[in-house]
């Protein structure tokens, strides 16, 4: 039975390498990076065997190891992907629950995180092999940590499959996890740049002492305590870690029993909506109809609103490292609005592809390209215009010099309108495969085109390049005089408006000329 589970897991892993060459290269590269990092950590741990400060080594391993075990449990909630070894897929085979639960746990050994953790644990065994008894405790603790991580991952996947059973719940959980990662990135960068030893020498030790008595860090702390001579504490923590492992196994077994008799997807009642929404509010013409449909997509389609949620977080990720690097705060106040305008204008660069096969409605009805281009820009304009107006006022307020306001408006307007113009053309001329409607916004499309990376790069950098003269005029305003701020406003507005008009015109012509090609691309992706 166990051999069959392992063989099935190996077959699933081998199927990962039967994809297109580009996706295969990404998978292989990711796996190699993880293995190389894990091997480097193992070599570093082997080198720590001769480190004089054994207590410091123990404290670091306990803190980092506790975070790793917590990650094994939380990552399934963040990713929100379907479990390839879901117990419910074996419900019709009539397997005993205990054998099914144990087989799935052992199959979890054949995964990239488990292999990486194994590399690290081998290094810890060498690190704590200062005596025969400490080596034995380190070996036992390593086995407990390995199966604790696998069981924590299996329990996390099982709970995620039960509680995130609907598509919308999985999307919200994944979006929340990605937001958490994005917000924690600058926090982690800030933590790495703090002199913890100089600030409080005992902070790491106190944190380690607390985590060492928890289920997360007990197994990591036991061999370190044995190496430092605290044999009683080492045995008690090893017992605590073993008890945690037993409880995890019982929890996983109960979860398997529960999942075998629970449906995979509960039926969600369909909500009745009154009225026509945006279609009642906007004009009864092609532009109004397309704008109403686009606004509806932006409000309901997760592929759109996830991007909108990410846009306000981009300045945070950019500003925090700059603040850590020592950039004055009043200068940082000028960064968020133009940066958000870059991403907001870029968000529609592949808008046609999001329609999927529904694009045939525009083509079969003979919709003019101009109407299609303008209608699709209404949601971006409805968000971008208030953002530029209010955001520029707030930024200049924190900059504490109202003379800069014209330049802020000019630079932001130029970047935003240019981005809309470039997006209007690229979405009709260079569409590429995207996630299909109804799928997770974080999943990979079924088709992959090599031109997508070039399209994304050019459409992202294009507005910034066009706005460089306006940015130069803004710097002249800061260094020379106020009149250059006014010039930056006028040039930015005119340049952005010209770029937007040209982009809409050329995009409309491309839409009318390439209608059948767009439909073919939508069906292929």
Image (cartoon, helix red, strand yellow):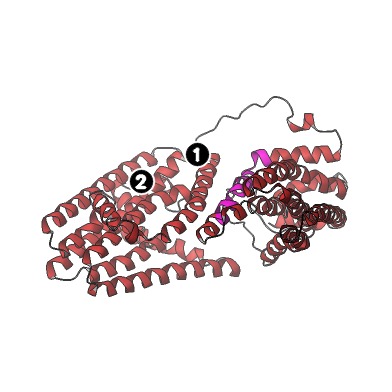
Question: Residue 469 is drawn in which quadrant?
Answer: bottom right
Question: Residue 3 is drawn in which quadrant?
Answer: bottom left
Query: Which residues lie in the magenta part?
Result: 298-319
Q: Is residue 461 left or right of residue 284?
A: left
Calculate the distance from the C-alpha at mark 2 to the C-alpha at mark 1. 21 Å
The answer to whether any part of residue 212 appears in the image is: yes
**Crowd around label 2: few <14 · some 14–19 · many ≥20 (10 Å):** few
Q: Which mark is residue 350?
A: none
Dot placed on the residue nearer the N-terminal end, 2 or 1:
2
- Report the mark closest to the observer, 2 or 1: 1
Q: Is residue 369 left or right of residue 322?
A: right
**Crowd around label 1: few <14 · some 14–19 · many ≥20 (10 Å):** few
Disc 1 marks which residue?
Answer: 265
- Percent across and percent down for residue 339 are 66, 54
- Percent across and percent down for residue 102 are 30, 53
Camera-side residue: 485 or 351? 485
Q: Residue at x 66, y 51 (%)?
A: 340
- Percent across and percent down for residue 408 are 72, 51
Camera-side residue: 225 or 30? 225
Disc 2 marks which residue?
Answer: 94
- Percent across and percent down for residue 285 are 87, 36
């Amino acid at each position: 039975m166990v051999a069959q589970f392992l063989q099935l897991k190996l077959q699933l892993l081998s199927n990962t390498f039967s994809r297109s060459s580009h996706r295969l290269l990404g998978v292989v590269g990711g796996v190699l990076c993880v293995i190389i990092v894990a091997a480097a950590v193992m070599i570093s741990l082997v080198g720590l065997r001769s480190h004089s400060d054994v207590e410091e080594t123990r404290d670091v391993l306990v803190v980092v190891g506790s975070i790793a075990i917590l990650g094994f449990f939380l990552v399934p909630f963040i990713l929100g992907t379907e479990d390839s070894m879901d117990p419910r897929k074996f419900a019709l085979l009539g397997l005993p629950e205990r054998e099914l639960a144990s087989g799935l746990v052992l199959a979890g050994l054949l995964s990239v995180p488990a292999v990486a953790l194994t590399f690290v644990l081998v290094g810890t065994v060498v690190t704590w092999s200062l005596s025969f008894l400490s080596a034995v405790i380190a070996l036992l603790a390593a086995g407990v940590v390995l199966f604790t991580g696998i069981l924590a991952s299996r329990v996390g996947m099982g709970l995620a499959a039960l509680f995130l059973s609907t598509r919308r719940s999985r999307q919200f959980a994944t979006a929340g996890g990605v937001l958490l990662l994005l917000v924690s990135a600058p926090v982690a960068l800030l933590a790495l740049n703090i002199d913890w030893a100089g600030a409080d020498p005992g902070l790491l030790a106190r944190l380690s002492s607390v985590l060492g008595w928890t289920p997360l860090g007990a197994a990591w702390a036991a061999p370190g305590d044995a190496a430092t001579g605290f044999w009683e504490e080492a045995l008690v923590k090893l017992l605590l870690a073993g008890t945690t492992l037993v409880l995890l196994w019982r929890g996983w077994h109960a979860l398997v029993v529960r999942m075998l008799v629970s449906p995979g997807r509960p039926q969600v009642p369909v909500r009745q909506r009154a009225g026509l929404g945006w279609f009642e509010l906007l004009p009864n013409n092609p532009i109004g109809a397309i704008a109403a449909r686009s606004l509806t997509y932006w409000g309901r389609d997760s592929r759109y609103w996830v991007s909108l949620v990410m846009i306000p977080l981009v300045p945070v990720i950019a500003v925090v490292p700059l603040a850590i690097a020592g950039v004055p705060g009043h200068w940082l106040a000028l960064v968020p609005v133009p940066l958000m305008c870059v991403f907001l204008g870029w968000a529609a660069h592949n808008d046609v592809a999001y329609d999927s096969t529904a694009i045939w409605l525009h083509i079969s009805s003979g919709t003019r390209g101009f109407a299609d281009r303008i209608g699709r820009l209404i949601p971006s304009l409805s968000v971008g215009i208030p953002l530029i107006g209010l955001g520029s006022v707030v930024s200049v307020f924190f900059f504490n010099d109202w003379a800069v306001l014209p330049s802020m408006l000019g630079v932001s307007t130029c970047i935003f309108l240019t981005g809309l113009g470039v997006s209007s053309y690229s979405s009709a001329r260079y569409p590429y495969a995207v996630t299909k409607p109804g799928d997770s916004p974080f999943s990979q499309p079924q088709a992959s085109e090599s031109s997508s990376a070039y399209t994304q790069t050019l459409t992202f950098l294009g507005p910034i390049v066009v706005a460089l003269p306006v940015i130069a005029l803004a710097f002249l305003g800061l260094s020379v005089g106020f009149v250059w701020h006014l010039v930056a406003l006028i040039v930015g507005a005119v340049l952005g408006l010209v770029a937007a008009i040209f982009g809409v015109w050329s995009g409309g012509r491309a839409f009318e000329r390439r209608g059948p090609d767009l439909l073919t691309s939508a069906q292929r992706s």
